[in-house]
Image (tube, rainbow, N blue to C red):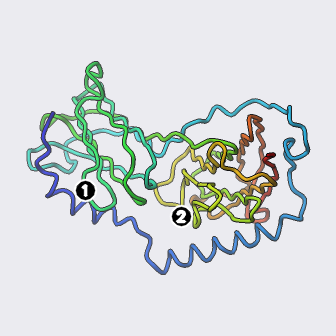
Amino acid sequence: MRFFYQTAAFAMPLFMLLGGAVAPVQRNAALAEENGKVFRFAESLDAAVAKSGVLLGESNIQTKQNSTSTATLLRSDEILEQGDDTFDDGAYFDAHYFTGRANQEVTIYLESDEFDTYLLVFGPDGSVVAESDDLDPNSGTNSGATISLPSNGDYAVVATSYSPGEIGRYVITVNTALGTGDIQATLSWDSQDDLDLFVMDPNEDVVTFSTPQVPSGGALDVDANALCRRPTDSPVENVYWPQGQAPGGEYRIGVSLYERCTSTSGPISFTLTLRVQGSVETFTGTVDEENDLVVFNTAVYR
């Protein structure tokens, strides 16, 4: 184990970098826009929607199950090299960032065949929440950690070497398991744009990024490309109710284009996978500026 004596000196500059933070005016504007989308989502429920086979009473419906059970919050293939920032002992380092939620469990890997890796993870307040030399006794030069995140916010994953001066190519990955239960709605798409997933429960409470948890137990545990910050090429959003907690009744699921984060134009294709009391259905669709909200229905029977 390499004792990381530079932690205190490094935490404050990193915390300033993380600052993560959307300015208050921008954040308020974003939430106002999101609330507007929730209102339009509720208003659109009487419009034509894609009906779930579960809602139509076809309880034996089964379609090909989406294999997604985890989401990649961060993946980067980089090079630790001369010219990178250095710690006091001369070790080079790179910082990478992802956004997490309190109590979310994440697994972080730092892998290289060219140098002996050393992993550090800093929380939103700049404190060290994990550090690792070896993933396991047989991992060779690789590092890793599985942690429960202490708070909402931006986290820094720092790639460095066990011995000062080492350089080489590495891959850093942050994965999280998707929550599941009575009902699970998983949205995936193949762009860096910001799509949003909404789910309204039978009590008409809506799970969304501005309200990630509702009284019935529904929760948003992964929110990708939010506000175009730290975008990924393989984004996933996930809303679920734990086993035995989802109230019986009809659920409405909305997929919305919140913001384009790239210079692309045209429809953005998405896949929505619904797991409801053992049945699995997969829907596909598109959203764009002209059709920025698509609504699906399903139900839980008690």
Kind of residue sitting beneath label 1: Ser
Secondary structure beneath dot 1 equals loop
Query: Going from the N terminus, do you reach mark 1 or mark 2 first?
Result: 1
Choose between 115 and 71: the one closer to the eye: 71
- Is residue 255 found left or right of 62 in the rendered image? left
Instruction: Mark 1: give few (<14), some (14-19) or many (20+) Cα within 10 Å.
Output: some
Point 60% across, 58% down: residue:
194
Q: Of helix, strand and loop, which one carries label 2?
A: helix
Say which residue appears at 23% left-offset and 45% top-offset. Answer: 93
**Spatial separation of the CA atoms under disc 1 and disc 2:** 25 Å
> Vertical placement of 62 versus 32: above or below?
above
What residue did someone put label 2 on?
Answer: 227
Which quadrant of the figure contains the N terminus? top left
Residue that protrudes farthest toward the bottom in the picture: 25
In this figure, which residue is indicated by the disc labeled 1? 127
Under mark 2, the amino acid is Leu
Mark 2: few, some, or many residues within 10 Å (few <14, many ≥20)?
A: some
**Picture coordinates of residue 211, whole percent (x, y):** 59, 65
Q: Is residue 99 visible?
A: no
Q: Which residue is found at the position 20% from the left and 36% from the top?
A: 161
Left or right of residue 25, residue 2 in this image = left
Question: Which of labels 1 and 2 is toward the front?
Answer: 1
Quadrant of residue 262 within the rendered picture: bottom right
When asked about the image quadrant of residue 14, the answer is: bottom left
Residue 178 placement (x, y as % from top left): 56, 42
- Please tell me how many numbered marks the rendered image carries: 2
In the figure, 124 relative to 301: above or below? below
